[in-house]
Image (cartoon, rainbow, N blue to C red):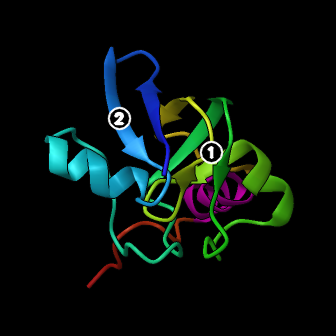
Amino acid sequence: MSTYTVEFVGTGETVQVEDTETILSRCLDEGIAQEYSCRVGMCLACSAEIIEGEVTQPAARGLTEQEMENYALTCMARPQSDLKLDRGKYPPSIESEIEADASTGDGAAADD
């Protein structure tokens, strides 16, 4: 079992995470605010861009194979090295969906 340092860029926050636990679970244990919702790798709320380092996240079903190289779902991701993550950064597939919803009004509340 190995322990790695996970640094969240721009916040000055770091956490020590064992390679057998998820980044999200350690953040919650340490009182570090990390956005999340489903905790099963589908909603992408806990997404972070990988600036440096490597993770394993075989159950991250919400990401494409290519996106898994550059983004971590902290609810599923386990560190394989020291990491630098940029929280709140979403993969291109979800960013394009958000932009499409905004332009069509699909994300807005329905009129009564």
The residue depicted at 47 percent of the width and 67 percent of the height is: 107
In the picture, measured across the screen, residue 22 lies left or right of residue 91, that is left
Quick check: 26 above or below 7?
A: below
In the picture, measured across the screen, residue 94 lies left or right of residue 5, that is right
Quick check: 106 above or below 22?
A: below
SS for dot 1: loop
Q: Which mark is residue 55?
A: none
Q: Give the residue type that dot 2 points to.
A: Gln
Q: CA distance from mark 1 to mark 2?
A: 12 Å
Residue 92 picture location, percent across and down = 74, 50
Q: Give the residue type that dot 1 points to.
A: Gln
Q: Nearer the viewer, residue 18 or 89?
A: 18
The residue depicted at 46 percent of the width and 60 percent of the height is: 20
The residue depicted at 30 percent of the width and 58 percent of the height is: 25
Is residue 97 located in the magenta-colored stretch of the structure? yes
In the picture, measured across the screen, residue 86 lies left or right of residue 33, that is right
Q: Tally the marks.
A: 2
Q: Main secondary structure of the magenta part?
A: helix
Report the residue marked by disc 1: 80
Mark 1 and mark 2 residues within 8 Å of each other at the beta carbon: no
Q: Quadrant of residue 5?
A: top left
Quick check: 8 above or below 29?
A: above
Is residue 107 located in the magenta-colored stretch of the structure? no
Report the residue marked by disc 2: 16
Point out the stretch of residues depicted in magenta: 93-104
Graded by Cα atoms within 10 Å as few (under 14), some (14 to 19) or many (20 or more), the crowding at tag 2 reads some
Residue 31 picture location, percent across and down = 13, 41
Residue 34 picture location, percent across and down = 30, 46
Quarter placement of the C terminus: bottom left
SS for dot 2: strand
In the picture, measured across the screen, residue 90 lies left or right of residue 36, that is right
